[in-house]
Image (cartoon, rainbow, N blue to C red):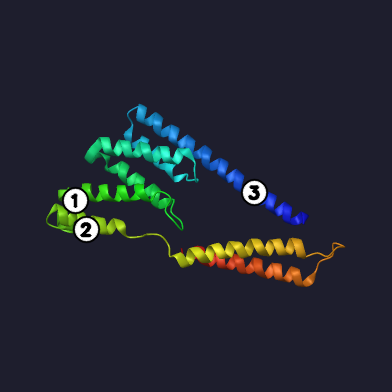
Amino acid sequence: MKPALVVGAIVLATLGALAIRVVVEGRTALAEGDEAAAAGRTDDAIAGWETAARWYLPLAPHVDEAYARLTVLATERGARGLAAWRAMRSAALATRHLWTPHADDLAAANAKIAELASRDPEGAAAAGPDAETRRRFHTERLARDPRPGSGAIVLAIVGIACWLTGIGVALRRGFDAAGRPARRPALVGAALTVAGLAAWAVGLYNA
């Protein structure tokens, strides 16, 4: 039982440290964006808020605040707010996994980017002769999913689960009461660990 508790404590401590780093980095980036906005450096403000949004953690307040600032800036700047809409889209795409935490923000950004891009006369030849045709063209392109296939993601997750299970089996069942190695449980734990690492690597490679 003790080895399992040790492993659990290590995992929880690691996750806690990662969560603290995400919050600290996110708040720092948000503050840097605010300082840039106050100084009139719009591009730097957008970059700071996008970085804050990318430091995603469920329920972390800096993420919602970053999206809110980008939305206000994009709305107030009109056509010049295209960079802010693109930053929102980039952050939303970067933080997607099996689901999209900020799906509404992504949809709003895609719609505004398509609308603003359709008004660009330089894009007429490539996208279509009129604004509505160009808007549909850009909407379709923005709607394409650039994420890796769900199969690769699931394989990587299963690999991690097998990897951790193998370590747990090796630590908990790999030794008898006298502290001597138990051959069969140790081999099972090692096999699960190796298989998990292999599945995780294949999943990442195909992502």
- Label 1: which residue? 118
Instruction: Label 3, secondary structure: give it.
Output: helix
Residue 175 location, quadrant: bottom right
- Residue at x 35% of width, y 47% of height: 105
Q: In the image, what residue type sits under mark 2?
A: Phe
**Residue farthest to the bottom, as pictured:** 184
Residues marked 3 and 2 touching at CB (< 8 Å): no
Give the camera-side residue of 16 and 1: 1
- Residue at x 75% of width, y 69% of height: 185
Q: How crowded is mark 3: few (under 14 residues within 10 Å), some or many (20 or more)?
A: few
Relative image position of residue 44 (x, y in whole percent): 36, 36
Mark number displayed over residue 137 = 2
- Label 3: which residue? 12
- Residue at x 74% of width, y 61% of height: 171
Q: As displayed, is residue 86 above or below residue 188?
A: above
Instruction: Label 2, secondary structure: give it.
Output: helix
In front: label 3 or label 2 = 3
Q: As displayed, is residue 174 above or below residue 115?
A: below
Which is more N-terminal, label 1 or label 3? 3
